[in-house]
Image (spheres, rainbow, N blue to C red):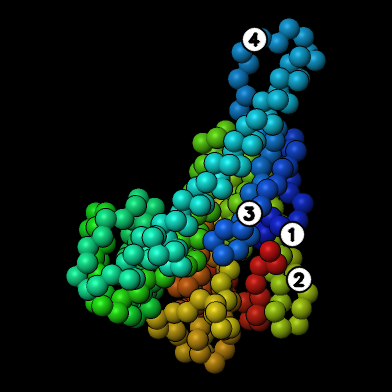
Amino acid sequence: MNRIAVPAATCSAHAGHGHPTRWLRRARPLLGTLVEVGLDAAGFEAVDDGAATDASQAAFAVKAFEATYAVHAFEAAFAAVTAVQACLSRFEPGSDIGRFNAAAAGTCLDVQPDTVVVLRLAQQLFDDTGGGFDVAQGSGRWSLCGHALVKHDAGTRIDLGGIGKGHAVDRAVAALCASGARHGWVNAGGDLRVFGAAELPLKLRDERSGGVTDFGWLHDGAFATSCFDAPGHARLARPAPGHANGSAPSHASVQAPTCMLADALTKIVALSGNAMHPLLARHGAQAWLHPHAHRLAA
């Protein structure tokens, strides 16, 4: 089996290399899906302040430390996702993307750092694919200069969708780590990232015949699968013949160092029909094109 994957919601987590674990999970509806955060309550970096006088007091202090920091870590992770949603959601009129889509041609908007990070990658991938990866989906032109987002055509509409969701997962993982968590994962409706010693199994669901199949494991990385053959799923600016938006279904999975990259690269793999696309190696990623309609069983 490939050591790659990760739908935390469908499996029992474990930690590799002999690390003890006591997994805690919390979930909230965000990003138009259910965002699950998992962490090892025993995996925080505790500091011995010398206050405990015996073993029982020390054990109690450790338990209290873990409980307190686990709560803080969960809150920090969900706050990070909420902040990204507030910047990137096209459904929120006050978000950077909501304001941009409603603006007139020639408008220059000052946008938040999260928006800048995602748009920079979107612009890079647009250039690298000759316009194939297009978060405006052919609706018009836009440009980014520093923190200034410029709308060049009245009809331009940006949808950061999956790539924005991937960034939210990355931000949540960063928040967990900053809060002291050493092992865990974040799963946002199939955009998945695992860190530390956690290892989680991946199962793919066959949307035609039903059932799930084992696919692999993921340790310290990100994984995403995108569907391009059903209404409401991701669309591409220029699909390859017989692939996305064409006559044949295309489900692409990508493992990458970050969730934002993994999600974005699924679109490029489906666009090209090439699971060995050169951009994968450039970004330290690998990909799979599924012959049938498979999605993460999250």
Q: Judge whether 151 appears above or below 69 on screen.
A: below
Residue receiving disc 3: 28
Amino acid type for the residue under numbered disc 4:
Gly
- Could you tell me which secondary element the residue under label 1 belongs to? helix
Visible residue check, residue 116:
yes
Disc 3 crowd, CA 10 A, few/some/many (<14, 14-19, 20+): few
Of mark 1 and mark 3, the one earlier in the sequence is 1
Report, in whole angstroms, how far the alpha carbon at label 4 lies from the one at label 3.
38 Å
Where 90 sits versus 30, above or below?
Answer: below
Check the image and name the residue furthest to the bottom. 247
Mark number, residue 212? 2
Instruction: Say which of marks 1 and 3 sits in front.
Output: 3
Residue plotted at (50% across, 66% down): 162
Instruction: For the C terminus, give its image quadrant.
Output: bottom right
Separation of marks 1 and 4 at Cα, in angstroms: 41 Å
N-terminal label among 4 and 3: 3
Q: Which residue is mark 4?
A: 50
In this view, 191 is above or below 157: above
Q: How crowded is the residue under tag 2: few (<14 C-alpha within 10 Å), some, or many (20+)?
A: some
Q: Which mark is residue 10?
A: 1
Residue at the spot x=52%, y=73% of the render? 275
Q: Are marks 1 and 2 in contact (CB under 8 Å)?
A: yes
Inspect this view and state whether residue 257 appears. Answer: no
**Lower sequence index among marks 1 and 2:** 1
